[in-house]
Amino acid sequence: MEFEHRRCIVHLTAGIENNAIVGHARIELPRRAVSTTSGEDVHDMEFHRDFIDENEAIWFAREGAIAWIDEHVESGDPD
């Protein structure tokens, strides 16, 4: 799954690691949108919880990615 938030492109996936479902979010940051606390162009996140299924893991990864973007990306034109 892919979506855009504050000019960032977010790729979401879920998979199995060590017999548990894991949510993944890869955030592609636009140039000049990164706050002074971070200098990266891509930010990867993994979420290890007791997810019921892959849909729940993807939903959780989406919420985590949005929260990270809202905290770390300078607001230009918010959604």
Image (tube, rainbow, N blue to C red):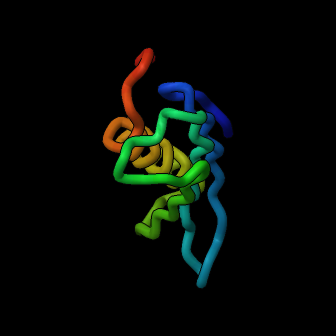
Q: Indicate left or right for 76 with 8 as reference.
A: left
Q: Note whether 55 is above or below 22 in the view shown.
A: above
In the figure, 2 relative to 45: above or below? Answer: above
Would residue 32 appear left or right of 35 to someone viewing this image?
A: right
* x and y percentages locating residue 32 in the rendered image: 52, 34
Name the quadrant containing residue 2: top right
Q: Residue at x 48, y 59 (%)?
A: 52
Front residue of this view, candidates 63 and 52: 63
Question: Quick one: quadrant of the N terminus?
Answer: top right
Q: Nearer the viewer, residue 22 or 70?
A: 70
Residue 37: x and y in percent read: 35, 52
Q: Residue furthest bottom?
A: 18
Q: Residue at x 46, y 41 (%)?
A: 34
Estimate the x, y position of residue 5 in percent, counting from the top left.
Answer: 51, 28
Residue at horizontal 56 percent and vertical 67 percent from the top: 21
Classify 47 as above or below 33.
below
